[in-house]
Amino acid sequence: METGVICGARVSHDRASVDQIEAAAGEDVRTVIEDLLSRDGVSEAFAIQTCNRAEVYVVADSVAAGRRALAPFESSVDDDVVVETGHEESLVHLMRVAAGLESLVLGEDQILGQFKRAVETARGLGALGPILETGLTKAVHVGERARTETEINEGVTSIGSAAVRLVETEADLVGATALVVGAGEMGKLTAEALADAGVAELIVANRTVPHAEHLAETVDTEARAIPIDGVGDVLPDATIVVTATSHPEYLLDSGDVDGAGETLLIDLAQPRDVDPDAATVDEVVVHDIDALESVTEETREIRQDAAEAVEAMIDEEFDRLLDAYKRRQADEAISTMYEAAERVKSREVETALSRLEAHSDGDLSEEEREIVESMADALVGQLLSAPTKSLREAAVEDDWSTIQTAMALFNPEFGDAPTGRTGAGSNDPERGDSEVPQYVLESISDD
């Protein structure tokens, strides 16, 4: 029986600065997950990194092993900005992240796409087993429900649009020239928001120029594309600059912006694109993602009713998730019980048929053989009917000791496993992996 406990740790915008999130984040999600999987006692792993969060999760054979595996992540920043989560806390938090309740912009749509990509990365690495696979699939389902059944994503729906809202509080966008550095998802959303806000010209810079050209062609204003190494040449022309790349080092420093004139710089990147020293240059104002808090608070207040509806949705879906884990625990124990009985039944039926044939001085007819086999099937089904019911009741009541005892009785190779945790069994949350005959499945479903 596959078991394990989830341990999680996160550094996010609710208590950490951009610098601290940057310090906690790894090179990329793939690298972080591979590192987690290499640690002793870890059977599953997941990580998600965005501009305002770095989160890691492992399934380990004990809480102590899980915490040891996460220690390097936690040691990269001060203790007061790290939030540790246990098994069920982690499952709930992952649903909240996918639903947008933990985002800087409450209900933002982009986090769900980022979440799905992180899940696919982990799945591609073979990092998801029966526990995280089920929990993450449920989190994605909750994220999709939240956006289709509530108004959690009405209004300002991205960090890009929030950045433009911040710019509008400090500069006149109408008729201005704006530079967007980065043509990825964040850059695209920012460029579209700037165009909608009335900028006269938009310059898009990107390492891959065709991507920048495509974005320039789609926005509803005059726009042109340039290579990223041409940013310095156009800085004097732009009064608003928004950076949103995944470059590992600073793209702009004080020397780059010196002489650019009056410039408002918004750095949305993680890690940051703009050296904080750039803010020391006269006429240059630099904001990072922490400055968006005041803008996003208004959105948070407007969406409060929707957020409460999503909270209720999460409570409902969490109960369903626990029920799925419990059913799987019971079904695996039941399958083990029936498989053990099937082995004994098959052996004894063959012995009985051989003896009957010896006494009858000839082969038994097919009908006679079926009568003996049907009687054996009926005996197994009836004898195990009561234990089947008891195991299902034990799962509902979180009675792990009863399930563990059944596994040990019917499977001598079954070893001791962590107790008191949901989340064991097959990859399918609805049923256990079973190779028992049809009569067994019918017997199980009848109770």
Image (spheres, helix red, strand yellow):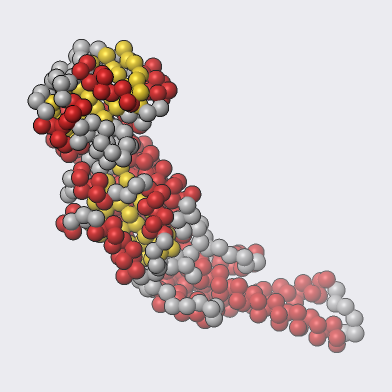
Q: Nearer the viewer, residue 314 or 22?
A: 22
Q: Nearer the viewer, residue 258 or 210?
A: 258
Q: Nearer the viewer, residue 279 or 33?
A: 279
Judged from this view, the residue extending furthest toward the bottom is 359
Residue found 18% across the figure and 26% down from its top? 257
Whether residue 142 is visible: no
Residue found 60% across the figure and 73% down from its top? 339
User: In the figure, 86 relative to 157: above or below?
Assistant: below
What x and y, as percent, mark residue 106? 24, 39
What x and y, as percent, mark residue 318? 35, 55
What x and y, as percent, mark residue 136? 40, 51
Q: Nearer the viewer, residue 187 or 104?
A: 187
Q: How many marks?
A: 0
Q: Quadrant of residue 410?
A: bottom right
User: In the figure, 25 relative to 265: above or below?
Assistant: below
Whether residue 79 is visible: yes
What x and y, as percent, mark residue 447? 53, 67
Is 125 displayed left or right of 234 in the figure?
right
Judged from this view, the residue extending furthest toward the right is 361
Residue found 71% across the figure and 73% down from its top? 374
Is 148 displayed left or right of 330 in the figure?
left
Judged from this view, the residue extending furthest toward the front is 255
User: In the figure, 435 relative to 311: above or below?
Assistant: below
Residue found 71% across the figure and 82% down from its top? 348
User: In the figure, 284 relative to 32: above or below?
Assistant: above
